[in-house]
Image (spheres, helix red, strand yellow):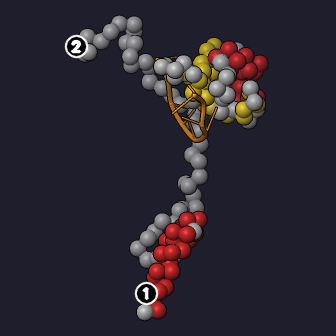
Amino acid sequence: MAMRAAAIKVAAVSTAAPRGLRALYSSLPGFSFNLPPTQVEKPPPAEPSTNLFVSGLSKRTTTEGLRNAFAKFGEVVNAKVVTDRVSGYSKGFGFVNYATLEGAEAGIKGMDGQFLDGWVIFAEYARPRPPLPSLNNGYPREGQR
DNA sequence: ACTGAGCGG
């Protein structure tokens, strides 16, 4: 009887204290939710490139504002604030393309963690993207709708 | 509507 009461108490603690679930499950046989000390943290962002991913933007920040803020650290070839195609409103992130990797590096160091239109923005190297699938060199695809 | 992590054309 005593064990049964203990089991019920454990269940009650489980639901009442979600923060302690990890430690609780770790002590239970058959439950190895133990997080490895390594490899649980954020993986390194990306490999250096001239393309930058900028997040944390204000909804009022436009492409010109983004370009203007990053142009101080290097030659910006292309800048784009991603907007929703139906509503036209900013999604709060964008991309900045520098002419050189040095410019991109300077842009990250200069703008990452800085304020832009009242919001702290984050600048990092963008992930490599495959060439535009939809455009196909400006011609529509044959044999495919 | 514009919300708050994210990787567009």
Residue A145 versus residue B3 in the image, above or below? above
Left or right of residue A78: residue A105: right
Type of the residue with mark 2: Gly
| Residue A144 horizontal/vertical position (percent) | 25, 16
Given the image, what chain letter belongs to the residue carrying mark 1?
A
Image quarter of the C terminus of chain A? top left
Name the residue located 48 percent from the left edge and 26 percent from the top edge: A129
Name the residue located 55 percent from the left edge and 54 percent from the top edge: A39
* Residue that badge 2 annotates: A143
- Residue A67 visible to the viewer: no
Residue at the far top in the pictured view: A139
| Crowd around label 1: few <14 · some 14–19 · many ≥20 (10 Å) | few
Name the residue located 43 percent from the left edge and 18 percent from the top edge: A132
| Crowd around label 2: few <14 · some 14–19 · many ≥20 (10 Å) | few
Instruction: Tell me, for residue A82, which label it has, or none.
Output: none
Left or right of residue A90: residue A68: right
Type of the residue with mark 1: Arg
Quarter of the image where one finds residue A16: bottom right
Given the image, what chain letter belongs to the residue carrying mark 2?
A
Instruction: Tell me, for residue A4, which label it has, or none.
Output: 1
